Every structure is written in C-alpha cells, then in structure tokens.
Image (cartoon, grey):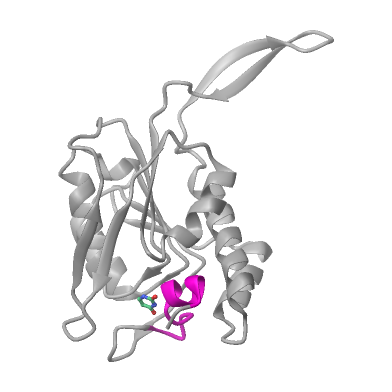
Amino acid sequence: MSLQLRVYVPDHPLVKHWLAIARDKNTPTPLFKTAMKELGKWLTYEASRYWLPTLEAAVETPVAPAPVTLIHPQAEIVAIPILRAGLSLLEGAQEAITTNSVYHLGYKRNEETLKPSCYLNNLPEEFSEETRVLLLDPMLATGGTIMAAMAEIIKRGVNPANVRIVATVAAPPALKALSETYEGLQVYTAIIDQELNEQGYIVPGLGDAGDRTFGTN
Ligand code: URA
C-alpha cells in the first residue's frame, strides 16, 4: 500500500445532498446541525471501511451454522472531535461506528494571526500503537488546527496510518501540510474547495462551521 496521504471524496448522493444543505447560507441552525450529523455519519461509514479490525467467527442461525465477520471485540477505537465545530460531526460518526472513548481537543483561532491556540486537551498520556483514531474537524483550511491536533495525537504513540480524519470541506493548504508530514494518513471529506480568503475561510466553503452549528456569530 502507498504511504502517501489519501484524500477520499465519496461520490454519493447523500453526501452531496447534505453538503448542499450545509453550504446554503439560508439553512437555519437546526437543519445545519442535521446536515453535519448526516455528513459525520456517511463520511465515517466510508472512513471505517478497511479500517475497523474484524474477527472471523461462526454463529448458529435458527437454521444452520454460518460463518460471520464481527468488529474485533478488543479493537480500541477512539473519536477525537476538535472543538467546537468537530462536535457537529460526532453524533453522526457514533451512529456509524461504536467508539470506546471520546477525547476532546479544543482550539480557538486567533483572528489576527490565524494561528490556533489550544484551550482544552483531555487526551491520555499515551495511546497504544494499535489505537484507531477518528479525528473530526469539519473545515480543513490553513491546516493550523489539524496539524496541531495531529502532533498531539502522534506524540502519544498513535500510528498515522491508523488515523482517519473526517472533514466536511478541505482546502489545499491543509492537505499539503498533512501530506508533507504524515505518511499513510487518510482524509475523508465531502468536497475539496480550492481557495481561502484573507481571513482564512474556505471559499466557497460553508462559513464558520462552529457558529453555524451553535447559532452564534
Ligand atoms: N473554519 C471554519 O469554520 N470555516 C472556514 O471556512 C475555515 C475554518
């Protein structure tokens, strides 16, 4: 398998539909939240393919024995939403897969420097190298936040090849930064937009994902 960054944009009508709802500036907050939940669900569904460890077993149906495949009971699967906006993807992600734990990382963007500063980190001191991490951040723009979050996770022992980033909109600066640093990482996003504006917002993007999720501005 190639060790390059892989970016998947699922060609699925449900992903396209909910992205359209999320992009529309006239979408009210409750429907925006639904759109992000749905995107979290379907993108996590795609991201979990070939990623969840499985176990071959056998069960008895009411009729006969049958070979089955189960999610491995000892699999360590954690979700890490990046606050605030990553919370919008968490509920849907957890409809798609069962996680052992949810750890929170909170970053706030300094609107002048555009640099992220961490205000919450409840990650454990160490993860096992086998831990699968679902990292939730809807907007991969300059890459500052996702790179800071990745650094915190990787320094605690996670293998980048076991990380799946689920985003809603991704832009080239963030994807470039990730690809230059992390071999084998995989990103799942509903769309790749080409541009950022002077404020670091993705164009056309969907605006401020945190504000739109929580009805603030
Ligand atoms: N964060 C957002 O919420 N939106 C953007 O366009 C970029 C970063």
Relative placement, left or right, of 2 versus 210 is: left
The vertical placement of 199 against 155, above or below, is: below
User: Magenta span has 214?
Assistant: yes
| Residue shown at the point (60%, 63%) measured from the top left | 11
| Residue shown at the point (26%, 64%) measured from the top left | 107
Horizontal and vertical percent for residue 33? 57, 67
Horizontal and vertical percent for residue 1? 35, 42
Relative placement, left or right, of 90 versus 128 is: right
Quadrant in the rendering for residue 136: bottom left
The residue lying toward the viewer, choosing from 49 and 147, is 147
Q: Which residues are magenta?
A: 202-215
| Residue shown at the point (42%, 72%) measured from the top left | 210
Looking at this view, name the residue that lies furthest to the right.
63
Horizontal and vertical percent for residue 7? 41, 60
Horizontal and vertical percent for residue 175? 31, 67
User: Magenta span has 216?
Assistant: no
Q: Quadrant of the C terminus?
A: bottom left
The vertical placement of 99 against 93, above or below, is: above
| Residue shown at the point (59%, 23%) measured from the top left | 69
The vertical placement of 134 against 109, above or below, is: above
